[in-house]
Amino acid sequence: MGVTKDRIRAMPRFADAAEETLQAAAGLFNLRRFEPGEVLIRQGLAADRFLIIESGHVKWERRANPDAPSLLDIYGPCETPGELALRLGVPNPASAVALTEGVAMFMFRDHYNTLLMGDDGIFRRTERCITDRAYSLWGRIEAAGIASVESRISAFLYRLVLKFGVCGPDGSITVPFVLSRGELASAVNCRRETAGRVMTAWEKKGWAKDLGDRLILAAPVLKDFEGSFGVREQYFGSGCARCRDCGIV
């Protein structure tokens, strides 16, 4: 199955693109299906492809050494891991590793630049998305300064809730994937054992439930994200962080 104009237009990034641009993009994009653990972008290599996630979730992780990957972020539908390096023409600063199965679309850098410079609609949305990502990074740096490990874990999970959470009738939120205790620990800069203790305590209280392929967070812990844990929504960027609901005008 190829990449059609309608398939591209369904991505908020391309919603304002001209018809002739969409027609050209349909001939330039390729599809890539991925499985958990597959490397889509490799740290240190030249950033030579524009990749946009259509479905599934991808980890953005950096390895200071082979045994110590640091989880920097999670990307989902409509997000574009590695785009800033592509724009700057520098090597990839981290790796994009599939967290779930999914589908991505990609094109080569020269084609990306041609579309970007040739269509004002794509350019405006691209600049907004990159600006939002920078703002979100500032927020995560702020959140990293929180003293309590429990609050740092809350901040990270709250970001996942804002980006990917699906509301349940009982007020709970489902995040459609799970992270290992080691991944969670690396994301908030704490020991694996500490992250494990926090999550185990929440599970005993009924605040969190790991179902193997998804994480359910109950209403009490969600309330605490905004209350006693001191987590604020401005840590995570503007509404564009949830690309599926992108409302750029």
Image (spheres, rainbow, N blue to C red):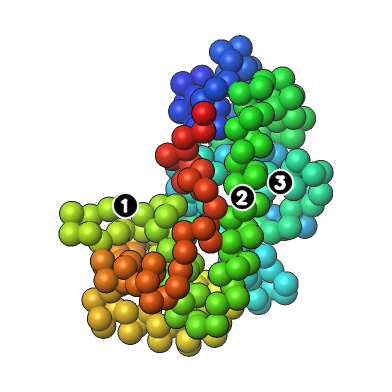
239 left or right of 42? left
The amino acid type, in three-letter code, at marker 2 is Arg
Residue at 66% x, 22% y is 120
x%, y% of residue 81? 62, 48
User: Residue 71, percent across and down?
Assistant: 58, 67
Name which residue lies at 37% across and 71% down.
Answer: 227
Provide the secondary structure element on which disc 2 rests: helix
Instruction: Give the residue drawn at x 36%, y 54%.
Output: 165
Residue 192 x, y percent position in the rendering: 51, 83
Q: Which mark is residue 192?
A: none
- Residue at mark 3: 84
Of tags 1 and 2, the one toward the viewer is: 2
* 197 in relation to 94, above or below: below
Q: Nearer the viewer, residue 186 or 223?
A: 223
Residue highlighted by disc 1: 166
Dot 1 lies on which element?
strand
Which residue is disc 2 drawn over?
133
Cβ atoms under marks 2 and 3 closer than 8 Å: yes
What residue occupies the far top of the structure in this picture? 20
Secondary structure state at the residue bearing disc 3: helix
User: Which numbered disc flags the more N-terminal residue, 1 or 2?
Assistant: 2
Q: Which of marks 3 and 1 is nearer the N terminus?
A: 3
Q: Earlier in the sequence, mark 2 or mark 3?
A: 3
Q: Which residue is found at the position 18% from the left and 54% from the top?
A: 169
Q: Distance between the residues labelled 2 and 3?
A: 9 Å
The residue nearer to you, when weighing 159 against 39, is: 159
State if disc 2 and disc 1 touch (CB < 8 Å): no
For the question of whether residue 133 can be seen, the reply is: yes
What is the three-letter code of the residue carrying label 1?
Val
Q: Would you call the spot at circle 3 few (<14 residues within 10 Å), some (14-19), or many (20 or more)?
A: some
Q: Is residue 144 left or right of residue 76?
A: right
